[in-house]
């Protein structure tokens, strides 16, 4: 298993510079939409095709699932054991405004969709001023710098959320927030400072660095929220929980949630346990 996870992490690392270089000139929308009905940038499709090829090239990988594809792509000869679920380009609407984006992945020991308890490893690449990579496996989180040659240099071992929370960021239009959530945010905004950049990976990296909470709540007209449980909720929850934080769909850890459909959406919150506990209390009142 460990060799398979090494191979997946290495494949994502080596793909990162190609994704980053490939962003230039791919800011226009494709004709189609992704399975969530959202418009696809050329960059979304490009990153997805690169990751599919590199990940299915690994003998131990039996299948590749992506936010950009209707169903799981199985390895040709039915070989392999592990399944990788990816959000090839998270926050792709930030490309035109030249802001942070990322690549998110989770490695599951079994067919997809699966519960969060099936996650063996997870991680993300953050295309910021520099390219960094966060990997959560075996209960610990490692931060690396990814160089342009596709190599990885560890810069933080056993990354933990800082003691003191500092920042918060919540998605969705404020008039669409429920009264209970809006009341909770009024408390949070009197305690923390706002950091919301429009790409979950960039915003969660703020929480990993400065402490606090990130979320995209269920909305009045969209109680399931915007983010996808398998491609965004599970891996980001696995990372933040492995770094000593907590996650929630408003009621329970996202890792205790199992999607029935591959592209199922979920309300998503990650960060300091105290803020997650207060959120769950506020939404259950
Ligand atoms: P993706 O680009 O993979 O669809 O993800 C975008 C998501 C997430 O990264 C971010 O937190 C959220 O959409 C931002 O949504 P709004 O633009 O509605 O704020
Ligand atoms: Mn995303
Ligand atoms: Mn995406």
Image (spheres, grey):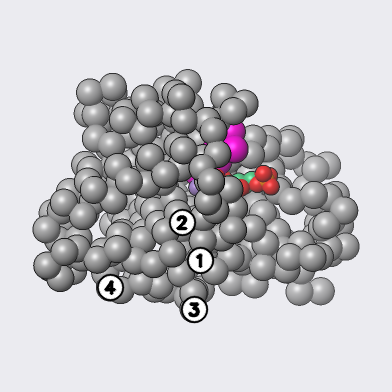
Q: Position of residue 54 (x, y in %)?
A: 22, 46
Q: Earlier in the sequence, mark 3 or mark 4?
A: 4
For mark 3, what is the residue? 260
Label 3: few (<14), some (14–19) or many (≥20) C-alpha neighbours in 10 Å: few
* 108 or 93: nearer the viewer: 93
What residue is drawn where x is 64% and y is 39%? 198
Q: Earlier in the sequence, mark 4 or mark 1?
A: 4
As helix, strand or loop, the secondary structure at mark 2 comes to loop
Q: Earlier in the sequence, mark 1 or mark 2?
A: 2
Q: Residue furthest front?
A: 31
What residue is drawn where x is 79% and y is 65%? 221
Residue 67's tag is: 2
Q: CA distance from mark 4 to mark 2?
A: 18 Å
* 220 or 133: nearer the viewer: 220
Q: Quick check: 74 left or right of 34?
A: left
- The mark lying in front, picked from 4 and 1, is 1
- In the image, the segment drawn in magenta is 90-94
What residue is drawn where x is 44% and y is 50%? 87
Q: Position of residue 55 (x, y in %)?
A: 23, 51
Residue 110's tag is: 4
* 45 or 84: nearer the viewer: 45
For mark 1, what is the residue? 263
The kind of secondary structure the magenta stretch mainly shows is: helix
CB atoms of marks 4 and 2 within 8 Å: no
């Amino acid at each position: 298993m460990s060799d398979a996870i090494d191979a997946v992490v290495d494949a994502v690392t080596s793909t990162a510079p190609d994704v980053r270089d490939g962003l230039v000139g791919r800011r226009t929308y494709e004709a189609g939409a992704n399975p969530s009905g959202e418009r696809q940038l050329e960059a979304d499709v490009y990153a997805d095709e690169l990751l599919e090829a590199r990940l299915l090239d690994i003998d131990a990988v039996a299948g590749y699932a992506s936010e950009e594809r209707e169903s799981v792509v199985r390895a040709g000869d039915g070989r392999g054991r592990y399944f990788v679920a990816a959000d090839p380009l998270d926050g792709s609407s930030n490309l035109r405004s030249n802001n942070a984006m990322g690549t998110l992945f989770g490695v599951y020991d079994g067919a997809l969709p699966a519960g969060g308890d099936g996650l063996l490893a997870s991680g993300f690449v953050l295309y910021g001023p520099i390219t960094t990579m966060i990997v959560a496996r075996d209960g610990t989180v490692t931060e690396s710098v990814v160089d342009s040659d596709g190599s990885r240099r560890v810069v933080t071992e056993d990354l933990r959320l800082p003691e003191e929370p500092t920042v918060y960021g919540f998605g969705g239009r404020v008039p669409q927030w429920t009264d209970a959530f809006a009341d909770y945010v009024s408390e949070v905004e009197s305690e923390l400072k706002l950091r919301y950049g429009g790409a979950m990976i960039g915003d969660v990296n703020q929480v990993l660095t400065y402490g606090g909470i990130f979320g995209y709540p269920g909305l009045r007209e969209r109680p399931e929220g915007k983010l996808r449980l398998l491609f965004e909720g599970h891996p980001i929850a696995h990372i933040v929980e492995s770094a000593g934080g907590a996650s929630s769909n408003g009621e329970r850890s996202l890792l205790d949630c199992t999607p029935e459909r591959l592209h199922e959406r979920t309300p998503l919150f990650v960060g300091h346990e105290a803020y997650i506990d207060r959120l769950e209390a506020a939404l259950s009142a």
